[in-house]
Image: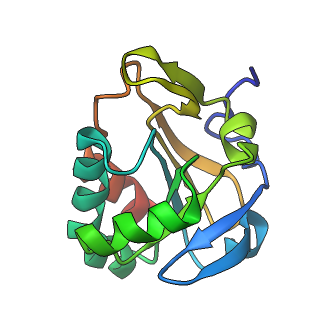
Amino acid sequence: MTQSPTIGDEAPNFRATLADGDLSKFEFADALGDGPVVLAFFPGAFTPPCTSEMVALQESLADFEAAGATIYGVSADSALSQNAFREKHGIEFGLLSDMARSAIDKYGLEIDIDALGLVGVANRAVFIIDEDGIIAYDWISEDPTNEPDYEELLNEVREL
C-alpha cells in the first residue's frame, strides 16, 4: 500500500466521479486555487459512523464555507449510491465516487473491514489542502469507527 502523504507534501492528484445531485467527472487539481479543500475519506455510505460524520460536516458546512473551504466526501461507493445518500441525509457538499480507488490508493487509505464484508474501502481520514495544493492538515483514524474532531478541522481551515 502507498504511504499516506503528510503535512507539507503536495496533495496527490486523482480523478473520480462527482456526485452532487448530478454526476460529472472530477479532477482534484481543478478544485485547487479557490481556498482550502477538505477531503473527508469514509468507508461507506449508509453505515452509522459514516452517516454521522457526513451529517456533522453538513451541519458545519456554512462555517467551512465562510472560512473559504470546499468540502468533499470520498468513498469507494458508486456515485449513484452517494447521490441517494446525499438526498436521504440532506448533504449539500459533493461526494467523490472513487470506485477505481485512485484517491484511496494515492492517499494510502485502503482497508478491509472484515466484520462488515467490506474490502478495499477507504479508512476514515481527513486531509486539508491549501489553495496551492499542499497538505496543511492530516488525520487518519486508527479505528474507522472513530470520527474526527470537527472543531479542530474548522480551526485548521480558519488558520489558512
Q: Residue at x 72, y 71 (%)?
A: 26
Residue 12 image offset from top left, x and y in percent: 77, 48
Of 63 and 112, nearer the camera is: 112
Give the image location of residue 53, x and y in percent: 28, 49
Does 45 sit left or right of 73 as displayed?
Answer: left
Asked if 30 appears above or below 140 in the picture, the reply is below
- Seen at 56% across and 23% down, the residue is 111
Is residue 71 visible in the rendered image? The answer is no
Q: Residue at x 54, y 53 (%)?
A: 74
Labels in figure, total = 0
View extreme (top): residue = 114
Closest to the observer: 126 or 120?
A: 120
| Relative side of 111 to 31, left or right | left
Query: Quadrant of the rendered structure where residue 15 is?
Result: bottom right
Residue 40 at x, y percent in the picture:
46, 51
The picture places residue 13, in percent across and down from the top left corner, at 79, 55
Q: Residue at x 26, y 40 (%)?
A: 49
Q: Quadrant of the N terminus?
A: top right
Relative to 108, 61 lies left or right: left
